[in-house]
Amino acid sequence: MSKGVLQPSQQKLAEKLTILNDRGIGMLTRIYNIKKACGDPKAKPSYLIDKNLESAVKFIVRKFPAVETRNNNQQLAQLQKEKSEILKNLALYYFTFVDVMEFKDHVCELLNTIDACQVFFDITVNFDLTKNYLDLVVTYTTLMILLSRIEERKAIIGLYNYAHEMTHGASDREYPRLGNMIVDYENPLKKMTEEFVPHGKVTPPSLQSFDMVYPRRNLSADQWRNAQLLSLISAPSTMLNPAQSDTMPCEYLSLDAMEKWIVFGFILCHSVLNSDPAALSLWKLSLQSSSCLCLFRDEVFHIHKAAEDLFVNIRGYNKRINDIRECKEAALSHAGSLHRERRKFLRSALKELATVGGSALFVFMALSFARDEIIWLLRHADNIQKKSTDDFIDKHVAELIFYMEELRAHVRKYGPVMQRYYVQYLSGFDAVVLNELVQNLSVCPEDESIIMSSFVNTMTSLSVKQVEDGDVFDFRGMRLDWFRLQAYTSVSKASLGLADHKELGKMMNTIIFHTKMVDSLVEMLVETSDLSIFCFYSRAFEKMFQQCLELPSQSRYSISFPLLCTHFMSCTHELCPEERHHIGDRSLSLCNMFLDEMAKQARNLITDICTEQCTLSDQLLPKHCAKTISQAVNKKSKKQTGKKGEPEREKPGVESMRKNRLLVTNLDKLHTALSELCFSINYVPNMVVWEHTFTPREYLTSHLEIRFTKSIVGMTMYNQTTQEIAKPSELLTSVRAYMTVLQSIENYVQIDITRVFNNVLLQQTQHLDSHGEPTITSLYTNWYLETLLRQVSNGHIAYFPAMKAFVNLPTENELTFNAEEYSDISEMRSLSELLGPYGMKFLSESLMWHISSQVAELKKLVVENVEVLTQMRTSFDKPDQMAALFKKLTCEPHVVTFPVWAASVLSCHIPFLVSSVEDFKDHIPRETDMKVAMNVYELSSAAGLPCEIDPALVVALSSQKAENISPEEEYKIACLLMVFVAVSLPTLASNVMSQYSPAIEGHCNNIHCLAKAINQIAAALFTIHKGSIEDRLKEFLALASSSLLKIGQETDKVTTRNRESVYLLLDMIVQESPFLTMDLLESCFPYVLLRNAYHAVYKQSVSSSA
């Protein structure tokens, strides 16, 4: 046989189609990225916007593709300086254009080979061959159209070539052909219609094989509904039967792909439209369905305008132009509503499939149909001027995407079940039927027979045991063999012509589908339901998401948007690896944004519910029952109060009374919206996007922690200007209501709300939270120390032992708060519950710091009077000498009240009944080492138990040790401090507020708190200085008794006005002290004076109240 004769079997059509289609997608990806880069000022090559190169670029573009370097030295001078950088930076762009040219050459060569072989194409018979052929035609056309849209292509190619010539002395060897190609394809469609004239005998017949397939796919929703498409339950008796079709792969073939094949195919071979009514009808049907087609990603092709512009210059095409205009009008008028109704039908159909289940064919058909409709909406909503905008705004698209994702999840989940089913199907049915078909072939050449026999043997050898053993199936070789066989048997003069044995082709197409159900489920999901195109419609994507969140009935489907981000990486190609990071980052940022917005929306709903619940809880507070009690009392006494017609106050719980089931409150709406959104957040435990794992529930947990923290601090209602703050009990009620709502979230979402409580509430026990913001501990500590206790020291508030609370005293300027409402036992208990052990420790430490500051002030006075106090210490039994020395003391009378306000807080410790710790504390021997004893006291103090020695006070006072004073001197000052306080007690008798009140069991100016203050400070000081606490307190008692006995001899009424009330201090000090006894007091101060003092103050109290 001569060399010039073409051997069809040697042309490797299947292999070439496969390789060129894959390479074509890679070239499209690279050209697309060049177009986007050139359209973005930030990403555009700097040489194209460099002012110094502007004249050179204009010159090159004007002269393109000619090269003139000799006579234009001035314009190209700057280019000479930048030539090496231009070669380096524009090489990728230039050689991409060269690759496009080479791809074009290979495609043209293959198309000519296919023409020469007179290949038979029929989508229902040799599906793979026809699909790959049409894909190649459309990919080639799309590539050339996209290339023509790069406005800077001449500048880039010309700049590179000029730089090359300046560097190497000659143009790049590919430049002449490349330049001519760029010029030839200025109008790509016109050029390609000329190219495709020789292919007119192959391309149109391949398109006409869609006569039955495309119209059947392009039906209205009503026709789908009447045919009960995708419904299993429409015929219950056949539910278990496998779905069968003669055109199995055509059933889930993308409608979008079919329309591109038909539109581009007939534009390129337009002459057939004038001669074949069937072809014209098919073309017109596709023109009526869409206004634009997807070229690549977000690049679109406006069908009607492009076709009209092409045909307007061709003589005798007026009818076709009129057809185009009619189709355009039909598309604009009816396509929107047609596709809207299809989406509506598919939502219910996919919901049924996701709920009831269905055959694999139905699932992939449904996915393909839904994907086509979503892509159509996305493309047209972004690119078409609409007559009716409602048809292009679908607020329910999230629901359709959600059901797609649900079906995809079912396919992945039940993959092993499908494998098991189709392995049995292939071996038990398909192998038998194929074997019979092969046996009945009248002619079967040896090569074809070997391939067909291998198919039968491969299927026959399959068994369920392979599935159970976890064997990996791979039928890619079998599918490629069938592709090759299609090529061998579809050429003219083939020994076994597939055109004459269509049943064989249809059966093999079905078998190929069954093999994909065994080993290529993931690839099938990508083929039928990949929505990575959303990556390139970010704005529309985000808008759809916002619409979904705004509509409560759709918010349950909002998880579909983050799930779509898992598709994005499937649109990348190995020929353009540099875009992987860009697309990956976009998928991560969008997924993160969607999950964050969902969590924020849920958090806001939860916050609103919490606010409502806090309001309801507030209605149950005791303060609100006063009016009800008042009304009840007045009703009994038949008193008329208030204005007539005043509306009666609603009692708590009225909101739960419903007269009508249809009555919906705001709280009901909030709970409904929350349950819908939480369904979405809880839908998947995690999702993997570009090798990053996202956990939707963690987003909600994080937002709840932040909001709970802010809400707790906000509910304190602290106003720094007016020093107002919420009562601890009211805050505790609100926090409990808030926590109750948060606990109920566990009914909607599988999150650990206890972890949220632990994280937030533990932070609130510290001075600052993890963000460095103030906590309730710092706010309440500041308020109690700076506001309440400051008023105590100013004499506006007193501690009433009988009430165990601070109470406001009558003053000229009324305080803005009622101290009793913030300091009684219930409020202190609420405060300790809010702040917790750490918070109370911080409050205690802050308080001790204030006490230590006051002690430091007293020590300064002691240092000033050290000589006088030393003499007084040894002269307490010499009244005359004591009187003379007292006059020498340089102090004001109220100095002794410094520690009073601090000690008053020590008076209201809340005793937590921790029996084991209490028992431990009570039975510690006195002779125990002080370090051990202090450890026990620290444990007891942490449990809220009163101790003989306050460990916190010891720590605070020990931190004040001066560096330049010896321990002996410090001890002496501590001793003299007690002397100072003892000899200063008589000055309190002259204070009009020092009067003892039996009703409150204390003095009006808080001096009754001195009893605890003296004992605790003495115990702390002499623990630090390792002195005898008991001896020092005995010395204090002797000095104090001597000083107080002295005022018994005074005759000045002003000096002794509250003498009896001050006498009682001695009794209180002894009663409070674990180190002093009444016997000791009796030896220093006659008990009869104490008895008379009690009698006098009680008598005075009765007379004043009378």
Image (cartoon, rainbow, N blue to C red):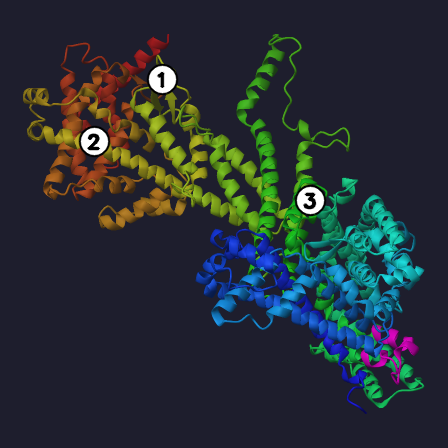
In terms of depth relative to the viewer, which is nearer, 998 or 81?
Answer: 81
The x, y position of residue 497, in whole percent, is 89, 80
Q: Quadrant of residue 607?
A: top right
Location of the C terminus (image quadrant): top left
* Residue range of the region highlighted in magenta in the rendering: 487-509
Secondary-structure class at tag 2: helix
**Residue 226 seen from this side:** yes
Label 2: how many residues lie within 10 Å, few (<14), some (14-19) or many (20+)? few
Q: Name which of mark 2 and mark 3 comes first in the sequence.
A: 3
Secondary-structure class at tag 1: loop
Residue 267 inside the magenta-drawn segment: no
The x, y position of residue 245, in whole percent, is 88, 67
Q: How many marks?
A: 3
Q: Name which of mark 1 and mark 2 comes first in the sequence.
A: 1
Which amino acid does the dot numbered 1 rest on? Leu
Of badges 1 and 3, nearer the viewer stands 3
Residue receiving disc 3: 548
Of badges 1 and 2, nearer the viewer stands 1
Q: Quadrant of residue 1068?
A: top left
Residue receiving disc 1: 809
Q: Name which of mark 1 and mark 3 comes first in the sequence.
A: 3
Residue receiving disc 2: 1079
Report the residue at 17% width, 27% height from top.
982
Report the residue at 64% width, 24% height from top.
651
* Picture layout, residue 554 above or below residue 174: above
Q: CA distance from mark 2 to mark 3?
A: 83 Å
The x, y position of residue 1055, in whole percent, is 18, 13
Which amino acid does the dot numbered 3 rest on? Cys
